[in-house]
Image (cartoon, rainbow, N blue to C red):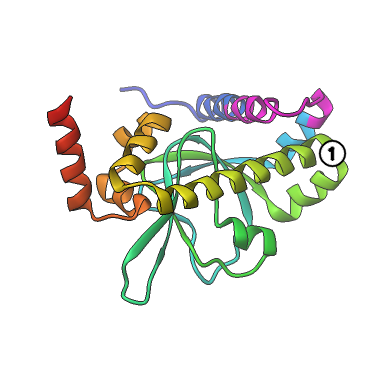
Amino acid sequence: MQKQKPAAKAGFFIFSLMKALQSLFQNIERYVALTEAEKDKISAITSLKTIKRRQFIDQPGFISKYRNYIVKGAFRSFFLDSEGKEHTVQIALDDWFVSDFYSYITQTPATLFVEALEDSHILQMDYDAIEPLCRELHALSEYFRVSTERAFAFSRNRALSGLSKTAEERFLELQRLYPSMIQRVPQKVIASYLGMTPEFLSKIRKKLTSVS
């Protein structure tokens, strides 16, 4: 097989970066409009990274330095309790942002592990570059404000769901809202996210399968 020439590889990378940026801009423009000049400024401080499965992009003790946009892939954020048990607090798929957001916003050491569940491609925006740009570009600042508010509302609803719904109802809700998540994410991670054991989740799924 003929080896790919360096120039061809560079061309493929540029094409991939362009497609990734297009996906990011489509996400942003659901909420705000961007001029071509604004897109150019955002592109200039954004880099495309390949993250291998089980690789961490944030971990406790290190400050979260990037806004990470998932072009293609799956991640989870989790912490370890005093007994070493994992507790998943976020699952993120294509077209979502993921990081230890508290660490990023406050620029203090992270308390969460953020781990790739699949080989993934992400766009990274460094804190020292994106935050000044947010002050310069009102549209970008407004986008992140809206995104933060939506994330807060989602976290509130998830907390209420955990208090008011049965384990089966929580699973059905997740399945209805994010069917691809159920297919792509390991059952033990789904169980941790829903606050139950993998064995109990397995029983729920078997019950639902037998009923259907």
Q: Residue 182: x percent and y percent?
A: 32, 36
Q: Name the secondary structure under disc 1.
A: loop
**What amino acid is labelled 1 in the image?**
Leu
In the rendered structure, the answer to whether residue 82 lies left or right of residue 12 reads: left
Magenta segment range? 20-38
Q: What residue does disc 1 label?
A: 137
| Of 122 and 153, the residue lying toward us | 153
2 relative position to 47: left or right: left
Q: Is residue 31 above or below residue 89?
A: above
Residue 174 in picture, x, y percent from top left: 38, 37
Q: Is residue 60 above or below residue 30?
A: below
Q: Residue at x 29, y 50 (%)?
A: 191
Residue extending furthest front? 164
- Viewport quadrant of the N terminus: top left
For the point 43% across and 39% down, the residue is 120
Looking at the image, which residue sits at the far left? 210
Q: Look at the image and say whether residue 29 sits in the magenta stretch.
A: yes
Query: Is residue 199 in view?
Result: yes
Residue in front for this viewpoint, 159 or 37: 159
On-image quarter of the C terminus: top left
In-image side of 141 versus 66 (left or right): right
Residue 98 appears in the picture as rendered:
no
How far from the left and from the top, in percent, is residue 59?
48, 63
